[in-house]
Amino acid sequence: MIDGVRIKNLKVIPDERGRLMEMLRSDDESFKKFGQVYMTTAKPGVVKAWHYHKIQMDYFCCIKGKIRLGLYDARKKSPTYNQIMDMILSLDEPKLVTIPPNVYHGFKCIADEESIVINTPTEAYNHKNPDEYRVDAFDNDIQFDWRK
């Protein structure tokens, strides 16, 4: 487990009207602050990787489809420097993944349908000066194979 990454198992509560699932609460141990909420999608087979933030924490939850989430710890002073995490997120076994600053992350849609991820980062997106740093999904030094 990469230092600072938290995985919270979520519970879907169904009834005759539909389903309810709490993803992130202000009284959660890993909650720091609210920046914004957004959704992002990926079509089958599409990889959206790699990037990291210097300030922002992300809280990822897949609410439709299935994704393969990859994490890479690039923090040289971290006890888990250079470690990789590889996990599957879907509504079948719902989870909230807390991603700390300076941990590269990305995902691949591994469903036969478009997958939807909800993110509740700690910072609002700054369009003039984004806290987002990218490297190519395939051409990099990260030992992670998206082709699997």
Image (tube, rainbow, N blue to C red):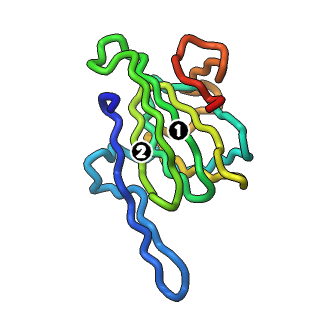
Decide which of 64, 101 is in the foreground and name it.
64
Residue drawn at x 49%, y 51% is: 61
Q: Mark 1 points at which residue?
A: 69
- Measured Cα–Cα span from mark 2 to mark 1: 9 Å
Q: Residue 104: x and y, percent?
A: 49, 25
Q: Name the residue under label 2.
A: 97
Q: Is the residue 65 above or below the residue 82 in the image?
A: below
Residue 127's tag is none
Lower position in the chain sequence, tag 2 or tag 1: 1
Q: Do the residues labelled 2 and 1 touch (CB within 8 Å)?
A: yes
Q: Position of 77 compared to 114: left or right?
A: left
Badge 2: residue crowd in 10 Å (few <14, some 14–19, many ≥20): many
Q: Quadrant of the N terminus?
A: top left
Report helix, strand or loop for mark 1.
strand
Residue drawn at x 65%, y 29% is: 147
Total marks shown come to 2
Q: Position of 60 compared to 130: left or right?
A: left
Decide which of 114, 88 is in the foreground and name it.
88
Residue drawn at x 42%, y 50% is: 96
The amino acid pointed to by label 1 is: Leu
The amino acid pointed to by label 2 is: Val
